[in-house]
Image (spheres, rainbow, N blue to C red):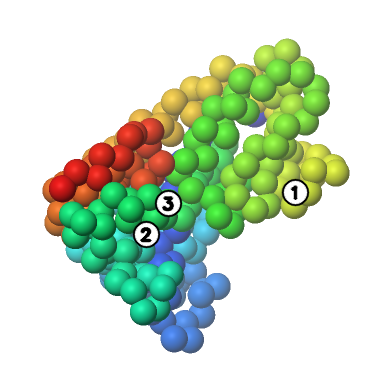
């Protein structure tokens, strides 16, 4: 039985930092730590060499480098990069629909132990999955999407069982542990607050990079906050 858990919002800062290293030893934690910190970002969490805690990230040059790298791409090699289209009032609304979520998600901890890491294609919008897991009813297993591979959750009253990671739904995967529903719900609420604080740090960075008009919807797209894009000029 897990007597407590914590959900830690994290972002994967490989983009813009480690992807500039032509042949860096990306499984070398000391190497990754030094490059990430030198870029002006917080040190990675102990459980993963590329993940940094979102709430430790502050508006500044490091976060600006990361955001520029995420936006400085184009799906059409002959077309303008996304950032240029966000700056242009004529193309802003369409470009906002293409804003990618920042890679990362939620690290599940109990004390000093890491119980689960976000998977490939995970992002901060996956808080909705954790909310659904805290509300899950019944013994039937349900998918808890954290990226690929993902977790599974089942319930016995107010006791939740977490298993995984798995890459299909044919089996439960390794057992992570059991936790009371209210404790997981509390961890979800705390993680939501951390995500909001991170969004506050992103706001001035996005305003400087893409302009004041685009910044609110750009931030919302990055962290998957509920909003209605305005596409305002």
Residue 59 shows in this picture: no
At 68% from the left edge and 14% from the top edge, which residue is drawn? 158
Query: Disc 3 marks which residue?
Result: 101
Q: Residue furthest right?
A: 170
Query: Disc 2 marks which residue?
Result: 43
SS under mark 1 = strand
Query: Disc 1 marks which residue?
Result: 166
Q: Are marks 3 and 1 in contact (CB under 8 Å)?
A: no
Picture coordinates of residue 52, whole percent (x, y): 41, 55
Up-down: is 119 above or below 228? below
At 48% from the left edge and 48% from the top edge, which residue is drawn? 123
**Nearest-to-viewer mark from 3 and 2:** 3
Q: Residue furthest top?
A: 157
- Reading the chain from its start, which is encountered first: label 1 or label 2? 2
- Reading the chain from its start, which is encountered first: label 3 or label 1? 3
| Quadrant in which the N terminus is drawn | top right
Up-down: is 5 above or below 198? above
At 47% from the left edge and 41% from the top edge, which residue is drawn? 125
Q: Residue furthest bottom?
A: 23
Q: How many marks?
A: 3
Up-down: is 42 above or below 202? below
At 20% from the left edge and 63% from the top edge, which residue is drawn? 61
Q: Give left or right: position of 120 versus 143.
A: left
Picture coordinates of residue 184, whole percent (x, y): 56, 25
**Nearest-to-viewer mark from 1 and 2:** 1
- Reading the chain from its start, which is encountered first: label 3 or label 2? 2
Residue 186 shows in this picture: yes
Picture coordinates of residue 89, whole percent (x, y): 18, 54
**Nearest-to-viewer mark from 3 and 1:** 3
């Amino acid at each position: 039985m897990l007597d407590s858990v914590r959900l830690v919002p994290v972002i994967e800062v490989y983009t813009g930092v480690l992807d500039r290293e032509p042949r860096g030893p990306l499984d070398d934690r000391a190497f990754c730590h030094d490059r990430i910190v030198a870029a002006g970002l917080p040190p990675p969490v102990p459980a993963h060499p590329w993940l940094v805690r979102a709430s430790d990230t502050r508006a500044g040059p490091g976060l600006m480098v990361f955001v520029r790298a995420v936006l400085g791409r184009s799906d059409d090699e002959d077309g303008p990069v996304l950032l240029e289209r966000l700056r242009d009032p004529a193309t802003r609304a369409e470009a906002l629909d293409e804003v990618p979520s920042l890679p990362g998600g939620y690290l599940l901890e109990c004390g000093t132990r890491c119980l689960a890491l976000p998977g490939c294609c995970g992002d901060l919008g996956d808080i909705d999955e954790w909310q659904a897991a805290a509300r899950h009813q019944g013994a039937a297993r349900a998918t808890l999407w954290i990226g690929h591979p993902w977790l599974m959750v089942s319930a016995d009253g107010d006791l939740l069982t977490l298993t995984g990671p798995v890459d299909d739904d044919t089996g439960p995967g390794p057992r992570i542990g059991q936790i009371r529903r209210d404790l997981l719900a509390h961890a979800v609420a705390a993680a939501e607050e951390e995500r909001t604080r991170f969004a506050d740090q992103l706001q001035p960075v996005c305003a400087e990079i893409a302009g004041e008009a685009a910044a609110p919807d750009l931030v919302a797209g990055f962290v998957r906050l509920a909003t209605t894009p305005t596409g305002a000029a």
